[in-house]
Amino acid sequence: MMLHPDRLFPIEADARGIARRLFSTVEHLPIVSPHGHTDPLWYANDEAFPDPASLFVKPDHYIFRMLYSQGVKLEDLGVPRRDGGPVETDGRKIWRLFAKHWHLFRGTPSRLWFEHALQTVFGVEERLSEKNADAIYDRIAESLTSPSMRPRALYKQFGIEVVSTTDAATDDLAAHDAILKSGWSGRVVPAYRPDAVVDASRADFSTNIEQFVALAGTKLDYQGYLEAHRVRRAYFKARGATSTDHGHPNARTANLSAAEASALFERILKGASAGDADLFRAQMLTEMARMSIEDGLVMQIHPGSFRNHNPALLDRFGTDKGADIPQATSYVEELKPLLDAFGNNPRLTLILFTLDETSYSRELAPLAGHYPALRLGPAWWFHDSPEGMRRFRELTTETAGFYNTVGFNDDTRAYLSIPARHDMARRVDCAFLARLVADYRLDEDEAHEIAHDLAYGLAKEAYKL
C-alpha cells in the first residue's frame, strides 16, 4: 500500500519532473486550516482518542454514506439513534465491518486520506482488509495510548499553524476559552455560524431566536435581533474569530428597506411560510455582509446542499449522516442585491463556495474576476477530490486567475485527514502548474511563487490569519 511519491502528478515525464520540483518546496509548509469542523474540545481537553473506530469511522460522513449505500446499518457503525435505541459500541466490531467493506472506497479520495493517515501517523503500509483488520486495529489502538497521539501533539506533528472550528451563534465558546487560558501555543479560532437563528424553516427557530436575543441581552424585535448578531460576532472575534460561515439552500440575497425587513421578522416569529423563510435568509446574507464591513470578519457562503434528503435517516439518526445532496445553484441574479450594495467595497471579503460545478466558468469565475469583494473558495465537499480540484482550476483560472481564489481549506471533521487533504491539494495544484510550465504558458519561477501562495499564503491572507 505504500504511498507512491509521484501520486497525483502528471504522467508525462517533463511535467512530472516539474511537479516534483514544485512540490518539494511546498510539501512541508505549515498548514493553515481556515475552515473546518473539528471539535474544539479535542484541543481544550487534550485527551487520547478512545479507539480506531472513534477516530476514523464514527465522525466521518464520507464513510457513513458509502457504507449505507451498500446496505450497512448506521447502528452497526455506532451512530447514536435519536430515540436512544441500541447501537454497536464495540470499536473492534465496527472496525471489522469497516474493513470488510474497504473495497467500496477504491478510487475515492477517502481511500487516499485514510491510507495517508495510516502510513504517516501509524506507520502502517498494508492495505486494510478483513484478514489484517484486527492487527491494524491493535497497532493503532496501542499507538493511541501514547502522549504523542493526543490532539495537541498531533497538531504540532502535522505542522498546523492555525485551525478554525465552526461554532453556532449561541455557543458559549467555553472550549475556546479553555484553550486560551491553558497557555498552549497552538492557535484554534472559532467561526461564527448563525444558521440556526437565520433559517426560519427550522422547527426550533422561535426557540433559538428567544435564546439568542436573551444571550445577547437585546430586545425581541428586528433591530434587537440585528444587535444580537453584532454582540455575538464581537464575542466570537474577542476569542480569535476572523470569519463567519453561512450554509444556505441557495445563494439568494435581498436588500429590503428597514420597514420591510422588520415586518418580515415579525411574520416569521409567528410561523414562516416557505417563501418568507427564503426571503429572510436572503435578507440576512446582505445584513451579514454589512456587519462584515463594520467588524472585519471574512464572510463565507456555502450554498447548494439539499440537507437531510433522506427523511427516514433524519428521523432515526439526526443531521449530518451523509444524506445531504448537491443541487443546482445560481449566483448571478441571486447575489446581485448584495453586490449592488457592497460588491465594490474593498473592506468586504466574501468567499463563495459551490456544490454545482456547472457554475464555475459560467458564473463564479466571472463574478470573482470582476467584483473586488468576491473570492472563490476551493472545490468543496463532494468535489474535494483530485478530479474535483483539477476541474476547479481548469474552469476558474482562465477568468478569475489564481489570486481571486483563497488557496485550500480542508473542511473536515476527521482530524487525521487534515494533513492528508492538504497534501492532496498541494499535489494537485503542483500538477496543474507543472502542465502550464510544460506548455510554456508559465515560467517555472512564477509557478514556484504560485504554488507557495496556493498552499499557504492565499488562505492566510484571505481569512486574515
Image (tube, rainbow, N blue to C red):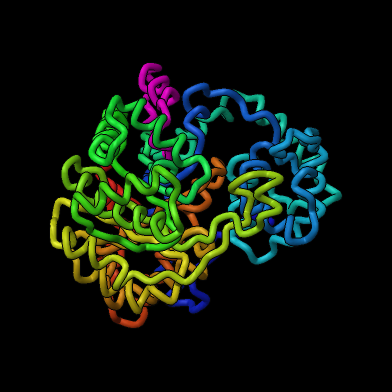
Q: Name the quadrant containing residue 137.
A: top right
Residue 417 percent across, percent down from the top left = 55, 47
Residue 241 percent across, percent down from the top left = 31, 36
* Residue name at image x 61 percent, y 59 percent: 309
Residue 234 position (above or below residue 166): above
Question: From where the camera sits, is residue 25 visible?
Answer: no
Residue 394 position (above or below residue 452): below
Along the viewing direction, whichever of 42 and 2 lies nearer the viewer: 42
Q: Name the quadrant containing residue 149.
A: top right
Along the viewing direction, whichever of 289 and 258 lies nearer the viewer: 258
Along the viewing direction, whichever of 414 and 336 lies nearer the viewer: 336
Q: Which residues are magenta?
A: 165-188
* Residue name at image x 79 percent, y 50 percent: 73
Q: Name the quadrant containing residue 237.
A: top left
In reply to whether residue 416 is colored magenta, the answer given is no
* Residue name at image x 46 percent, y 41 percent: 205
Which quadrant is home to the N terminus?
bottom right
